[in-house]
Image: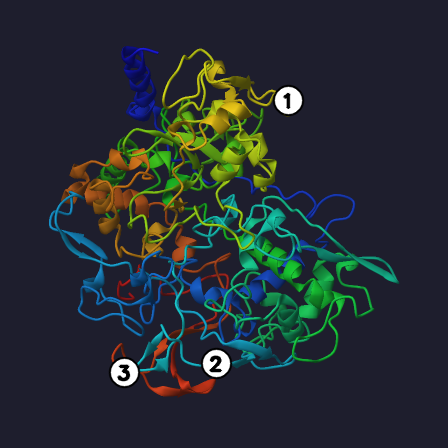
């Protein structure tokens, strides 16, 4: 192929990336959007859950119960504020996901202090500062690989637990070498910021690095990757067997089973098992030490009344009511093992507690959908833009000014290509199944604001606009897009490197699971192309359609090229290996080809199979974003203005994996008016029910660990758990009923109203 034709091809393909404003997806309403289906959970001849209402009650109680953790930590301890974590004291991790030694030591933050038990202030943010905030190549004034995460457990080595009362497990605890002040132990901090659980049901994979598999195996976060996973099924009175479980669209369950067991940072002591947690909780009164509001939207009917602690039932009763008896009714013991430190053998209910827990939490979190923001309810004009006629001010002038600001903010969101990553009703490419369902033509189905519903189909996000985002009707989890240098690279859909940190600071989705498999679907797709079938683990990878990629992998009518597989390399029709061609409804049928395995192997280390996964993280939802700071996977920005400034300078660190769309932000975003208007649009994604904790966002009482007595220079020792540990300070989050609280949730670092 001539140099001229190569340049021409590159220009044509890059033009897609620089497409006009009209090509960009329109943000769309979450109203009437269905949840991703989970076949076999609630339907079929033999469903796992037989009483959905009881399962949701079980999940809500478990989510908020401080007895779940080894030392007072509930799931809600990191997700109590708009589904996220609004704490400011003892929230810093030194950056332990870093490949560099600096990730094990704390830095002084811009305020001059830092490390364990530091209280964050506005002076500490952002964590990366430049002489010219609009230019990422200007002089660095301050930077750190420290992370604003979430305070969790003291850790320790698990010994045992009480099956009747007491929040704390028996663990051998001592001061951490990293998390301490003057050798007095402090609670460990997660190496990433806690994202909101509200609307997380729409994510195809959860956690920032996607390690919570879309398929729930009943035992662990790893889905089909875990060779030992399974659940115990009663076949008859004398027979129980362990069977594999693969529940798709159940990443919430995969995520839920992780913090209490699979590390000693978030909730548990090392070597604790799900069987131990089951033994601890099943015979207890649910939420036994926490007040439950009698008007709680889910738990009120089970509450003791008058804000008394606990529910009028046990976890065992809720499990037996919610789940199919074949998972808990076997009366024999001996097949399920026994505690490592002695004690009676486990029973079937204890052995399956991970499944009960994960699915109950998933069903509860599936109710946490915030679809009643001003944006969701606004009627649309002919171009699918919100008219904002539902917005009012105190006077006609104030109303007009509000609407003008929202319209300009909406235009800025689109013109700066924000919608290419924050696409669809969940405002995230990570909502793979939901976006796919809405982009599939389905006569008679619509979603969105009642006054102007949006029909399912390829134009659901604007006229053909989804094709410019990577969202597809085929639910592809891999695409090929340009990096910041306009080089085509394979990438996971919904996971993007935007240059928040250096490439060494955190691998993101480029990491591996405990079995040595890559978290990335992109890496698995490359294995598929190389005919390395053992490298393909996750369920959708082998069905990815090449013709849905943002820029082609191969072109049937192309001669030799350095960045694209061409006819001269050796091509085969996509799907021909499986005998089912994947060329239907392709915008460009010539792109419905993949390299032969020989051609892929010949280019295994070349540009044609290059990937951009290192440092890529899940695209978060923007819903309720004004309430869910600090922002980014490392919690490095405190305000929406700092986030807008970040995008205006095209990220902090330019690297080879950085996505091209980061280059789309304009420097004029940082003008006072533009920052205000774009922020106002983002704030219009806040559901007032979330702000005021109204149903379904109401909850039981929660006591949250909020640092230790003292500061980042001195901590008072003498915790009841161990003399060498710091005494906890706490925040009490009152129980709230369905009608919500009188005081709204405040943004991060903002004073309470």
Instruction: Calculate the distance from the C-alpha at mark 1 to the C-alpha at mark 2.
Output: 57 Å
Lower position in the chain sequence, tag 1 or tag 3 = 1
Q: Is residue 269 visible?
A: yes
Residue on which disc 3 sits: 714
Residue at image position (39%, 15%) is: 560
Q: State the residue in front, 681 or 486.
A: 486
Q: Is residue 307 visible?
A: no
The mark lying in front, picked from 2 and 3, is 2
Secondary structure under the numbered disc 3 in the rendered image = loop
Instruction: Calculate the distance from the C-alpha at mark 2 to the C-alpha at mark 3.
Output: 20 Å
Image-based side of 584 in relation to 388, left or right: right
Which disc is residue 173 wearing? 2
Q: Identify the image quadrant of the N terminus.
A: top left
Secondary structure under the numbered disc 1 in the rendered image = loop
Residue 428: x and y in percent read 42, 41
Residue on which disc 1 sits: 580
In this rendering, the answer to whether 231 lies above or below 5 is: below
- Would you call the spot at circle 1 few (<14 residues within 10 Å), some (14-19), or many (20 or more)? few
In this rendering, the answer to whether 576 lies above or below 715 is: above
- Choose top left, top right, bottom left or bottom right for residue 261: bottom right
In this rendering, the answer to whether 660 lies above or below 327 is: above
Residue at image position (58%, 77%) is: 288
């Amino acid at each position: 192929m001539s140099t001229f034709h190569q340049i021409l091809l590159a220009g044509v393909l890059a033009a897609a990336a620089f497409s006009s404003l009209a090509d960009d997806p329109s943000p769309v309403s979450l109203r009437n959007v269905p949840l991703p289906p989970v076949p076999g959970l609630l339907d079929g001849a033999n469903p796992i859950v037989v009483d959905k209402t009881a399962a949701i009650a079980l999940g809500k109680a478990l989510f908020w119960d401080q007895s779940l953790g080894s030392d007072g930590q509930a799931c809600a301890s990191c997700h109590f504020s708009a589904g996220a974590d609004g704490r400011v004291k003892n929230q810093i991790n030194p950056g332990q996901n870093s490949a560099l030694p600096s990730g094990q030591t704390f830095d002084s933050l811009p305020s001059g202090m830092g490390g364990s038990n530091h209280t964050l202030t506005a002076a500490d943010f952002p964590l990366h500062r430049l002489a010219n905030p609009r230019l990422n190549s200007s002089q660095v004034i301050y930077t750190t690989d420290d992370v604003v995460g979430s305070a969790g457990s003291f850790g320790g080595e698990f010994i045992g637990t009480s099956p009747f009362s007491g929040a704390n497990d028996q663990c051998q605890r001592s001061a951490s070498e990293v998390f301490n002040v003057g050798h007095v132990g402090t609670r460990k901090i997660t190496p990433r910021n806690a994202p909101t659980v509200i609307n997380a049901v729409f994510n195809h994979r959860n956690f920032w690095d996607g390690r919570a598999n879309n398929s729930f195996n009943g035992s662990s976060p790893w889905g089909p990757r875990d060779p030992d996973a399974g659940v115990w099924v009663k076949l008859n009175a004398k027979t129980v067997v362990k069977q594999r479980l693969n529940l798709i669209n159940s990443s919430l369950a995969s995520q839920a089973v992780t913090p209490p067991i699979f590390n000693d940072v978030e909730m548990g002591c090392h070597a604790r098992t799900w069987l131990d947690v089951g033994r601890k909780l099943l015979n207890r009164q649910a939420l036994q030490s926490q007040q439950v509001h009698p008007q709680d939207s889910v738990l009120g009917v089970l509450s003791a009344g008058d804000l008394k602690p606990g529910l009028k039932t046990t976890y065992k009763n809720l499990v037996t009511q919610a789940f199919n008896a074949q998972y808990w009714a076997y009366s024999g013991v001996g097949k399920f093992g026994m505690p490592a430190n002695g004690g009676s053998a486990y029973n079937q209910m204890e052995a399956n507690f991970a499944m009960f827990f994960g699915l109950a939490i998933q069903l509860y979190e599936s109710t946490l959908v915030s679809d009643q923001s001003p944006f969701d309810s606004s009627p649309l004009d002919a171009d699918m833009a919100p008219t904002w006629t539902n917005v009012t001010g105190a006077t006609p002038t104030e109303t007009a000014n509000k609407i003008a600001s929202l319209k300009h903010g909406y235009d800025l969101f689109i013109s700066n290509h924000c919608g290419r990553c924050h696409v669809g009703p969940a405002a995230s490419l990570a909502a793979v199944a939901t976006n796919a369902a809405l982009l599939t033509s389905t006569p008679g189905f619509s979603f969105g604001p009642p006054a102007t519903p949006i029909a399912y189909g390829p134009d659901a996000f604007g006229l053909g606009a989804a094709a410019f985002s990577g969202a597809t009707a085929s639910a592809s989890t891999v695409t090929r897009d340009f990096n910041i240098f306009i080089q085509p690279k394979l990438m996971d859909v919904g996971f993007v490197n935007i240059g928040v940190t250096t490439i060494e600071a955190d691998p993101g989705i480029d990491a591996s699971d405990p079995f040595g498999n890559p978290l990335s679907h992109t890496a698995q797709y490359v294995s598929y192309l190389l005919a390395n079938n053992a490298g393909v683990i996750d369920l959708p990878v082998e069905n990815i359609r090449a013709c849905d990629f943002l820029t082609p992998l191969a072109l049937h009518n192309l001669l030799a090229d350095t960045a694209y597989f061409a006819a001269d390399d050796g091509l085969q029709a996509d799907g021909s290996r499986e005998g089912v061609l994947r060329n239907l409804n392709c915008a460009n049928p010539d792109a419905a080809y993949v390299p032969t395995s020989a051609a892929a192997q010949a280019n295994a280390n070349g540009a044609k199979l290059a990937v951009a996964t290192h440092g890529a993280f899940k695209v978060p939802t923007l819903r309720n974003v004004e309430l869910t700071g600090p922002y980014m996977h490392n919690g490095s920005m405190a305000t929406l203005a700092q986030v807008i400034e970040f995008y205006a300078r095209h990220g902090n660190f330019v690297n080879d994996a950085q996505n091209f769309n980061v280059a789309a932000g304009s420097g004029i975003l940082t003008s006072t008016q533009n920052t205000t208007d774009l922020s106002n649009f983002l704030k219009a994604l806040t559901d007032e029910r979330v702000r005021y904790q109204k149903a379904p966002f109401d909850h039981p009482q929660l006591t949250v660990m909020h640092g230790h007595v003292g500061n980042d220079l001195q901590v008072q020792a003498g915790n009841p758990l161990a003399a060498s540990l710091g005494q906890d300070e706490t925040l009490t989050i009152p129980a709230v009923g369905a009608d919500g609280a009188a005081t709204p949730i405040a943004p991060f670092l903002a004073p309470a109203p």
